[in-house]
Amino acid sequence: MVKMVYYIVGLLIMVMDVVAGILGIQAEFAQNKAITLRLWIFECTHPSYEAFKLGTVATVLLTLAHVAAVMLSGCVCIGSKEELDQSSNIKRLAAASHVLAWVIMVIAFLMLISGTISNSRSRQNCGISNHHHLSIGGILCFVHGLFAVTYYISATAVIQEGKKLKHPATAGAAANA
């Protein structure tokens, strides 16, 4: 039963990231349908409320997926070179995917927010063209899903491994049952 919960949570994290990615790309399409006036590298665009809504939902889903991955798996951190040398491969994988998930999340979040704010009703953008923020943020949501699920799986494995090392008699008895 406990393993089924791990699978469901991992699947939920991935689904949220995939939906966020799809919504980010759809927001880019909605933004491209807005009225645009171009003169060389300068352009004026009217905001797209549809792109604003889709970008907002994509940003919220990305954030929820990241919070779920980090909060439900616990923290697996490596604080020193000696700890890195002594840690298992699973713990190294957890720490590396944790850092990469954070980096990708921050970049995707900033791209989605930038694209969403540019489609706010109160703004008409005129200036140097800055396309593709929403679609790049959406693509990074897919990448975030891979690292977030990798972190969730490896972090829960490290925690389970730690529990078995602390209580070897009960771990063996549970495996025999």
Image (cartoon, grey):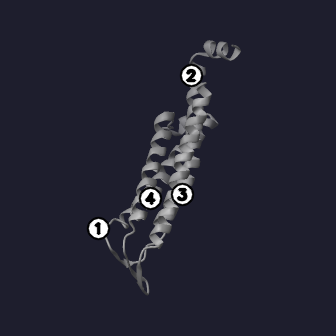
Q: Nearer the viewer, residue 86 or 90?
A: 90
Camera-nearest label, 2 or 1: 1
Are there few (<14), some (14-19), or many (20+) residues within 10 Å of tag 3? some
Camera-nearest label, 4 or 2: 4
- Residue hosting label 3: 22
| Secondary structure state at the residue bearing disc 3 | helix
**Residue at the image position 46 percent from the left and 57 percent from the top:** 107
Measure the alpha-carbon separation of dots 2 and 1: 54 Å
**Residue at the image position 53 percent from the left and 40 percent from the top:** 81
86 relative to 44 in the view: left or right: right
- Of pointers 4 and 3, the one earlier in the residue sequence: 3
| Residue 116: x %, y % from top left | 39, 62
- Residue hosting label 1: 122
| Residue 68: x %, y % from top left | 48, 39
Do the CB atoms of the residues marked 4 and 2 lie less than 8 Å apart? no
- Residue hosting label 4: 54
Amino acid residing under circle 1: Ser
Task: Give residue 5's quadrant in the image.
Answer: top right
Q: Residue furthest bottom?
A: 39
Do the CB atoms of the residues marked 4 and 3 lie less than 8 Å apart? no
Q: Nearer the viewer, residue 79 or 139?
A: 139
Residue 13 appears in the rendering: yes
Do the CB atoms of the residues marked 3 and 1 lie less than 8 Å apart? no
Measure the alpha-carbon separation of dots 4 and 3: 9 Å
Measure the alpha-carbon separation of dots 2 and 3: 38 Å
